[in-house]
Amino acid sequence: MSIKNKNYKYLGLIKELALTNFKLKYQGSVLGYLWSLVKPLMLFVVLYFVFTRIFRVGGSIEHYPIYLLLGVVLWGFFSELTAVSLGSIVQSGDLIRKVYFPRMVLVISTGVTSLITLLLNLIIVFIFMAFLKVIPSFSSLLFVAILFELFVLTIGVSFFLSALFVKFRDVAHIWEVILAVLFYATPILYPLSLVPNKIALVMLLNPAAQIIQDARYLLVTHQTATAWNSLALQYVWIPYVLPFVIFALGYRYFNKAAAKFAEEV
Amino acid sequence: MREEIAIKVEGLSKYFRVPHEKHTSLKSAALNIFQKRKYTVFKALQDINFEIKKGEFFGIIGRNGSGKSTLLKILAGIYLPDKGKIEINGKLSPFLELGVGFNPELTARENVFLGGAILGLTRKEIADKFDAIVEFAELEEFIDMKFKNFSSGMQVRLAFSLAVNAHAEILLMDEVLAVGDSNFQAKCIDKFIEYKKENKTVILVSHDLMSISNYCDRAMLLEKGKVVLIEQPKKVIARYYDLTVKNTDKNSIGKRSNKKAIYIESARIASSKDENKTHYDLFEEIKVSLKYKVLKETTNPVFGISVYNKAGILLFATNTKEKNITIGTIDPGNYKLTFYFNNVFLDGVYTVSSAIADENIVSFYDWKDELVNFKVYTNLANKGIIETESRIEIG
């Protein structure tokens, strides 16, 4: 049996686990799957009123509500997936001790579940866009590449977190704090223009900020400050390369640690 | 590796490092970062060597903590060995217990697909086998019911059915035989026989010595992570029994109960009609008389005999429990017990083993292999192992 054939086999397992996670999420609720659409919709309505009627931080940015929602959705994917996948290995301890399959499957399937949620949330965003008459340009197709980058970054971080959590249960608490710091260090609720220029440039080195800003640029408004249109040439590659470096290192660390999961979990 | 070998294990060792203080928080890890970690090395398996042929039923026995499950986990790929080489020839089932990965909130149907995927099957492969799996588990009517609403017997049946229908070439089973009702068990045994015909390999870890001796071609005895013996099951079981006795003795040093509480002193085999016969005829009643000694008051021991042919295959066994005979409590002293059976065996030499077990046949007070033997000589041409009454009608 070739290696390729073997790995292909586990794509099926990723799919099964991801669908199971998704199914169980809304098990027993009356609205069922509808919740995955209703929940973001309600959240967006709240955000819309708070940030356009009360705080008005958007200032001169056009389509600020959409701009805001897009940021919240993308950040939501990152924070939810990292927080959930952190425990994905430990929670499946029973499975790991009793059956062999590549342990990575657990993290990736959690990622696929979150990706389904993200895509549903994006549908709501697109509906809002149509409603508010935001017409994306042809370059918006690049958004797919940005989504890919986001997925790679998040899975890479999740590899580290889930493997570390097996050894150190403190990771959960530390990550909670780091997520809160990152949330405020990333221009999600506020536009980057509110931040002093020098600090804004440093903030754009963060791949999460770069991803959100690029997505806004592509889908909502070209007024968005992005990494590529703000950073100097010698720095501009950093946020784009970093997700792949994190993924590669996370992958290596995870694989090395995975050999001992069954004994340690 | 030669084609007929399913599994070859060479020089396999597995050590577990048991830290004296486990660092589960970063703080203690950080504080102790410059200290050398102190740990005890627990040698779970040491220099294990064996080969299992294709189509063989291989039993693994040993006391708790002898390394049986660790060995199975290494074969399954769950643990990595520290030393040694494992060669596996054929598709191996990567699980030890039944129903791993089943989710109680899903329906039985969904669980078959999920469980199958965990065993490494594609959706199409499972879909192809789906009907066979459900039929074998006898759950056709309940297939869209939630798994949590199944009785535990139904759950196990579905899990077992999925496992045996997953079409692995090598099956690893850790204490899984005692599932379902007797009807289902019979079906499982049929399945095992089918496996044998298909040249599939089964590795069975069990405390149930009866199933090891009935179904396995060979067995391995593990003790403290080392192989003690790989032989015919009955020889291995006898050795296992020696080991348990020796070790219980160690615990009671100084006490008078240094000897077994109850043991077989001697045995005699004879025809029930003619005491001095050296060989037996067909359908002659044979009696085996046991003389046994009771050293310590014992309650409800079970006495049994088993008859083997020259190849070491169990042909016939009976015991007092099977015959619903309750011995009651016996005081120290000398006693006698006699088994009678009708000789259906054709020409050959047969050996009789005998054992005394506790009430539930879990542990043995005594086990004597090849206690007595008997020869059968008939005038019939050699045409099988046994003879039974038969008739032919014409027209």
Image (tube, coloured by chain):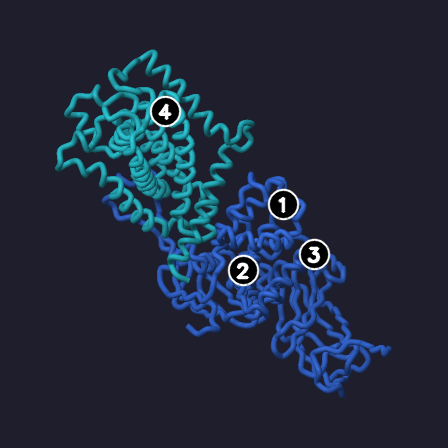
Chain colours: A cyan, B blue
Q: Amino acid at mark 3?
A: Asn
Residue at which label 3 appears: B183
Q: Work out how far the residue at label 1 is from the one at label 3, CA to CA, in angstroms.
A: 20 Å
| Tag of residue B143 | 1
- Measure the alpha-carbon separation of dots 2 and 1: 21 Å
Amino acid at dot 2: His
Residue B167 numbered mark, or none: 2
Mark 2 on the same chain as mark 1? yes
* Marks 1 and 4, how far apart at CA: 44 Å
Q: Chain of mark 1?
A: B
Whichever of callouts 2 and 3 sits on the residue coming sooner in the sequence is 2
Identity of the amino acid at label 4?
Answer: Met
Is the residue A67 above or below the residue A261 in the image?
above
In the image, residue A6 sits, relative to residue B292, either above or below, namely above
Q: CA distance from mark 4 to mark 3?
A: 63 Å
Q: Helix, strand, or loop for circle 4?
A: helix
Q: Residues within 10 Å of mark 2 (few under 14, many from 20)?
A: some
Seen at 42% across and 43% down, the residue is: A109
Rendering coords of residue A120 (x, y %): 42, 32
Left/right of residue B244 with respect to residue B382 in the rendered view: left
Between the C-alphas of marks 2 and 4, the distance is: 52 Å
Disc 1 and disc 3 in contact, CB within 8 angstroms: no
Looking at the image, do the residues carrying marks 2 and 4 touch, with CB atoms under 8 Å apart?
Answer: no
- Could you tell me residue B395's position as x and y percent? 86, 77
